[in-house]
Image (cartoon, helix red, strand yellow):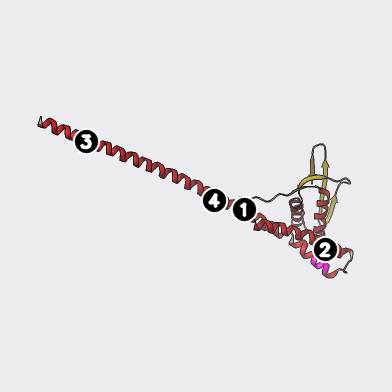
Amino acid sequence: VGIKGVATGIKHRIQTQNSELTIQAEKIQAQNEELRRQREELRSQAAALAEVDEHKNHFLAVLAHELRNPMAPLTTGLEILRRAPAGGEQALQAQAVIGRQTRQLIRLVDDLLDVTRIARGKLRIERETMDLAEVVRACADDQAPILAERSLTFDLDLPADPVPVHGDRARLAQVVGNLIHNAVKFTDAGGRLGLRLRGDRDAGQAVLT
């Protein structure tokens, strides 16, 4: 009876210890699961931060490029104003160029000051209905002095009828201005450039070549 009682006591203690070990193992497993969850959450947050940083870098790189483009027409316009008779046709044209390019700069600076858009890498779009031919003509006028400086011939082919589009005037002006600016940049002095706009109402498209 004594041996049996001792065996029963030992068995009971072993069962108790096994239960405690099981409880401890379950706690450790739960802690490990929590650590895995926290690690995945940190990994996800790190990936999100890296994406935001990438958006920011791309956004700022694009704007840095865009900020340079209005400078040449502004500088040329100011030089024309300095030399041209006040109130003359040249002076009025230069004032129009400076006004358009200043508004473009203000829009770009507004983008730079908007922290939310920088984080998301997105530009603000303000749509309106407009005549794309007017936008293209204004962009061509803004680049005219630079074209003249490089002795470039510029063929502007616009339709007689308006080309109505629904879009952001400033962004479209940026696109057209960049196209002309790059064409000027990569065309040898004395070369020839051409810009053609057509509207296809049936297809609902405006085609710029």
Residue 50, label in figure = 4
Three-letter code, disc 4: Ala
Q: Position of residue 101 (x, y in %)?
A: 77, 59
Quadrant of res 163: top right
Q: Position of residue 154 (x, y in %)?
A: 83, 54
Three-letter code, disc 2: Gln
Q: What secondary structure is marked by label 2?
A: helix
Local crowd size for mark 2, using a 10 Å CA cut-off: few (<14), some (14–19), many (≥20): some
Q: Could you tell me how far apart the alpha carbons at marks 4 and 3 are, in whole angstroms?
A: 53 Å
Label 3 sits on residue? 14
Q: Is residue 152 above or below residue 42?
A: below
Query: Which residue: 82% across, 63% down?
Result: 95
For the N terminus, the quadrant is: top left
Label 1 sits on residue? 116
Which of the marked residues, 1 or 2, is nearer the chain's N terminus?
2
Q: What secondary structure is marked by label 4?
A: helix
What stretch of residues is rendered in magenta? 77-81
Q: Could you tell me how far apart the alpha carbons at marks 3 and 1 are, in whole angstroms?
A: 62 Å
Query: Which residue: 19% across, 33% down?
Result: 11
Q: Position of residue 82 (x, y in %)?
A: 82, 70
Q: Could you tell me how far apart the alpha carbons at marks 1 and 2 are, in whole angstroms?
A: 34 Å
Q: Could you tell me how far apart the alpha carbons at marks 3 and 2 are, in whole angstroms?
A: 96 Å
